[in-house]
Amino acid sequence: MLGECVVAGLGTRTLRVLAVPYGHALSHVSRPLEVAKELRKRGHEVVFAGGGRQLRHVEEAGFPAIRDLEMPHEVLFGRIRERKLRFILEGELRTLVDEDLRVIREVRPDLVLTDGRISARLSTRAAGVPHAAIVNVSSTHHRAVPYVPVFGWVRPTWLRSLANRFNLWAEMAVFDRANPAFGRVARRLGLPPDVTATNCLEGNDLTLLPDLPELMPSQGLPPGHHYVGPITFDGSHLPDPPWWSELLLRKESGARVVYFTLGTTGTRELFRSALRDLGGRDDLAVVVSTGGQVDLPAPPANVFVAEVLDGDRVMELADVVVCHGGNGTIYQALRHGVYVLGIPAIPDQEYNLRRAEALGIGARVHSVDLAGPGFLSRMLSSKKSEEVLGARGGGTGARFGADGIVKLLGGSAQGQEVGDAEDLG
């Protein structure tokens, strides 16, 4: 559908883009935020809308933000953690669509950019507004690796390939059937019922895939879907935490640096486990990024705590990262050649960590392993993985994303064309 809603004759006209991320998760906010910064450099206007505490990063960056209703974090992620296939009800989806339409009428954008907004494909179609989305390959119906790999044991290769295709078809069909809300709301809006649970996070006109095909392979990508490369949180503007010089001294004295971060979707108990089981060791310096999920008062002397950190700067020091398996953390670790030990909380993270294991750059562990000597020995023996991204990991994803939006609306990209981003693979 690329170009279906193209605004003709953009020329040098200033664009107005409405960005609607899922505001409870930093990754869903930081990716459109980085794209918005690129668009702002080119003289375009970006207005954000959404709910959730992570939207504060948008306001700190100087963008206006309209507060609207969002799926409560504890409801949506509670269902996902409990492995419930039905993650949204019809009434909830209708409310989100109504909120989208209200904000669209207020902002009157040339394009809506979303990241994790479940209702966006329906609302932007109903409003007749071009729609671009940032979404990982794993959350599209073009993923080449199943979420639930049933036939990994099958041999030979040709038979395994056929089984894999059936596996993908079956899991998507089951997931879509478990979420009839999309078809029902589409019919109420007079739209074709082709938006499903599997494809609801993709764009109607442009889909930006912040991935590398080596880690997240795809199949059958249409013209409107593009790999743009990783888009990760840029924390370079953050001041040094008060303990930074002490961390550097411990690193220089030979301590191994463990970066313990569970983003904004991890569980509180895992942070406490980090303090209980890794604290008080002279051979370790443990850097903990809480994401604002929990307070950790009076940590041991070898544990350094902050709510938000410049992840790239910490990765430069880290010997290993213990994380939840989120895309942003994995791509930052890849950029710096740091081995990943992941404790997944939701299926998306399990998927990411299986892919990390397949490439040999990470491994899944269980939260109960934190207290065991096996985990500590595994962590201490891990080595810096080979740097996979190299120059490709350095902020190009946001630039390619901005290029795609400008080109979609009929203008000339100031950076490299989106099509050239495919060369990253």
Image (spheres, rainbow, N blue to C red):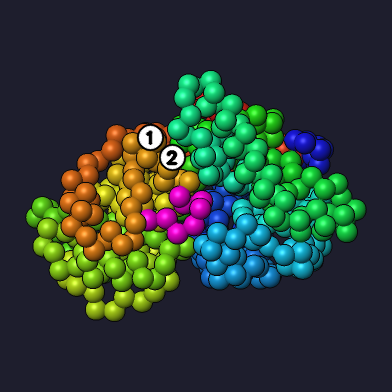
CB atoms of marks 1 and 2 within 8 Å: yes
Residue 364, magenta (yes or no): no
Residue 344, magenta (yes or no): yes
Looking at the rendering, the stretch of residues picked out in magenta corresponds to 343-350
Say which of 282 and 83 sits in front: 83
Q: Which residue is most to the bottom?
A: 297
State left or right for residue 251 relative to residue 156.
left
Q: Residue at x 41, y 46 (%)?
A: 353
* Residue 54 seen anywhere in this rendered image of the structure: yes
Tag 1: amino acid? Leu
State left or right for residue 325 relative to residue 42.
left
Place of residue 418 in the rendered image (x, y in percent of width and height, measured from the top left): 60, 32
Tag 2: amino acid? Arg
In the picture shown, does residue 14 fall above or below 221?
below
Residue 409 badge:
none
Residue at image mark 1: 359
Q: Residue at x 65, y 44 (%)?
A: 172
Place of residue 208 in the rendered image (x, y in percent of width and height, measured from the top left): 61, 41
Q: Residue at x 65, y 31 (%)?
A: 221
Place of residue 173 in the rendered image (x, y in percent of width and height, measured from the top left): 69, 44
Q: Residues within 10 Å of mark 2 (few under 14, many from 20)?
A: some
Q: Secondary structure at mark 2?
A: helix
Residue at image mark 2: 355
State left or right for residue 175 relative to residue 351.
right
Q: Which residue is most to the right?
A: 190
Dividing the picture into quarters, in which one does residue 8 lie? top right
Q: Quadrant of the N terminus?
A: top right
* Residue 24 seen anywhere in this rendered image of the structure: no
Q: Residue at x 23, y 54 (%)?
A: 375
Q: Secondary structure at mark 1?
A: helix
